[in-house]
Image (cartoon, grey):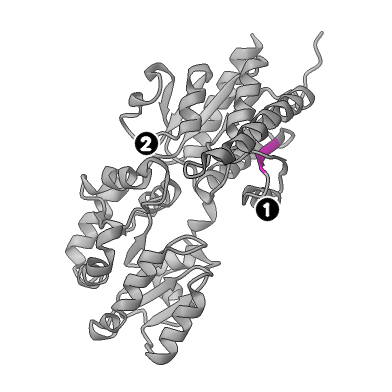
């Protein structure tokens, strides 16, 4: 009789929080259901998953893989060398770990890992966060057992019979029902009786958004609107100098917000880039949002993410090139329009995909069971 063993899951991908948060959420859901499950992450050396995944309590192995250089083609000889080396390392990892399934969430490392796993007979599942599929997932799709997506119309990129609409898993610590808006606003030392705009551009900030805020800083005083401003570390000194010269009691600025649950709860309106994870969080939190897609991402997928909401009245899209002139004036006028904020909140809530991690893990379990038969 074959000895029963604990489920083993290999999870690969990363590069940005948009890949890492879903990966960790899936791992957490697996551990919740199967406390004895063994989970191993495979990431790219020197990328943020090598820090974030261990912080979440999981083991990770790094591969020396990174993206192609489209500007300096000669550097791609080294890229190809590292890719071949990474495939070899991935094969060794799969052979030694013996996973029941390999889950790819996109990013450099998922390519060699999922490629190796599928060719060694391990079933694979892909999780695509964006409305415009990444190159890695498109290349891996033909051999995948299932492809979990967050947007309609993904049969443009993947075999239709493999697609499952699950939405993107998000950080559960954002959903704190024990705090009120008043408590959250006071947490940032602001006035609960005034409207609040939250600006988030990621841990590194968003240069265009920060400059747009800085250029129109007086408007927040003029319109008596409050601002929670996450600038990112690079822009922090500039913002602090600006606010020292132009003091404003309505503005709370910081390089990074550690309590995003408080920030979201306090906000009447959010200004954000259009990364897939951010959008999924905003949908679930039912937050009216102005999206300023980053132009510096592969295949302009943030614009496509934002359009999926703006065409349904669930968000306002302002192009990066137009942010300097339009962003702050649009935001301070909108945040005082309670009726429109309510309509936007209802529209974005209708697009939310709930319990995404649980739905993905259901598919993981189904594939593992089918593979045992």
Element under disc 1: helix
Q: Earlier in the sequence, mark 2 or mark 1?
A: 1
Question: Mark 1 highlights which residue?
Answer: 51
Tell me: 114 left or right of 359: right
Residue drawn at x 42%, y 38% as measured from the top left: 167
Q: State the image coordinates of residue 75 (x, y, percent, origin top left).
A: 58, 41
Element under disc 2: loop
Magenta segment includes 41: yes
Residue drawn at x 25%, y 50% as measured from the top left: 314
Magenta segment includes 290: no
Question: Mark 2 highlights which residue?
Answer: 132
Observer-nearest residue: 348 or 303?
303
Q: State the image coordinates of residue 9 (x, y, percent, origin top left).
A: 67, 30
Which quadrant holds residue 95? top right
Give, as a single range, the part of the protein colored magenta.
40-44
Report whether residue 213 is seen: yes
Residue drawn at x 58%, y 30% as measured from the top left: 111
């Amino acid at each position: 009789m074959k000895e029963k063993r604990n489920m083993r899951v290999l999870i690969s991908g990363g590069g940005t929080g948009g890949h890492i948060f879903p990966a960790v959420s899936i791992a957490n859901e697996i551990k919740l259901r199967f406390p004895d499950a063994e989970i191993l992450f495979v990431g790219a050396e020197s990328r943020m998953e090598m820090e974030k995944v261990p912080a979440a309590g999981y083991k990770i192995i790094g591969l020396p893989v990174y993206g192609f250089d489209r500007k300096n083609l000669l550097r791609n000889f080294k890229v190809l060398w590292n890719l071949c080396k990474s495939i070899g390392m991935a094969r060794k990892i799969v052979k030694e770990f013996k996973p029941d399934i390999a889950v790819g969430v996109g990013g450099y490392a998922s390519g060699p890992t999922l490629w190796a796993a599928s060719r060694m007979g391990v079933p694979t599942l892909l999780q695509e966060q964006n409305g415009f599929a990444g190159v890695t997932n498109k290349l891996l799709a033909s051999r995948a057992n299932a492809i979990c997506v967050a947007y309609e119309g993904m049969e443009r990129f993947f075999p239709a019979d493999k697609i499952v609409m699950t939405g993107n898993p998000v950080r559960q610590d954002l959903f704190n029902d024990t705090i009120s808006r008043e408590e959250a606003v006071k947490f940032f030392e602001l006035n609960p009786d005034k409207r609040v705009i939250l600006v988030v551009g990621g841990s590194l900030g968003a240069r265009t958004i920060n400059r747009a805020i800085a250029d129109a800083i007086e408007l927040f005083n003029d319109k008596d609107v409050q601002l929670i401003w996450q600038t990112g570390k690079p822009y922090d000194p500039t913002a602090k100098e600006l606010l020292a010269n132009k003091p404003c009691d309505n503005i709370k600025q910081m390089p990074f917000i550690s309590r995003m649950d408080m920030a979201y709860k306090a906000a009447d309106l959010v200004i954000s880039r259009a990364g897939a994870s951010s959008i999924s969080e905003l949908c679930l939190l039912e937050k009216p949002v102005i999206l300023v897609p980053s132009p510096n991402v592969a295949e302009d997928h943030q614009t496509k993410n934002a359009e999926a909401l703006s065409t349904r009245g669930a968000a306002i899209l302002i192009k990066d090139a137009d942010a300097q002139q339009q962003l702050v004036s649009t935001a301070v006028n909108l945040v005082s329009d309670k009726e429109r904020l309510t309509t936007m909140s209802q529209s974005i809530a209708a697009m939310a995909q709930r319990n995404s991690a649980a739905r993905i893990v259901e598919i993981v379990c189904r594939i593992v069971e089918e593979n045992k038969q």
